[in-house]
Amino acid sequence: MRCSCRVCGAYMVQSERGLSSGCRCPECLNECADCMGTIQTPLTAEELKKREALFLSREREEEQ
């Protein structure tokens, strides 16, 4: 995918770093993950566990 930087408009270079993949501008060093399908970066395993615990907690509260 070819992206232009939202900050300065320069051509951005894809940077593959596992879950932290995205694009980095060589001019202003802005980073984004827009072309990865989401603006939000992927969640870590710990963050997923916290969300699951919160979901289960809310589910239990609704049952009562």
Image (tube, rainbow, N blue to C red):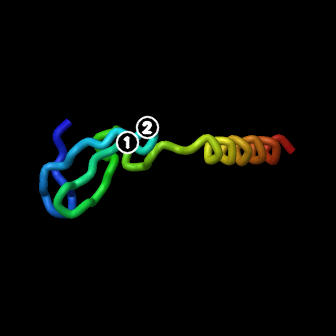
The quarter of the picture where the N terminus appears is: top left
Left or right: where does residue 14 sit relative to residue 41?
A: left
CB within 8 Å, label 2 to label 1: yes
Q: Position of residue 32 (x, y in %)?
A: 32, 52
| Residue count near mark 1 (Cα–Cα under 10 Å), binned few <14, some 14–19, many ≥20 | some
Toward the right, the furthest residue is 64
> Which residue was labeled with disc 2?
18
Out of 12 and 59, give the one closest to the viewer. 12
Query: Mark 1: which amino acid?
Result: Ser
Out of 42 and 18, give the one closest to the viewer. 18
> Which residue was labeled with disc 1?
21
- Residue positioned 46% across, 40% down in the render: 19
- Residue positioned 26% across, 42% down in the render: 14
Q: Secondary structure at mark 1?
A: loop
Q: CA distance from mark 2 to mark 1?
A: 6 Å
Q: Position of residue 42 (x, y in %)?
A: 48, 43
Toward the left, the furthest residue is 10
- Residue positioned 87% across, 45% down in the render: 64
Quarter of the image for residue 22 reads top left
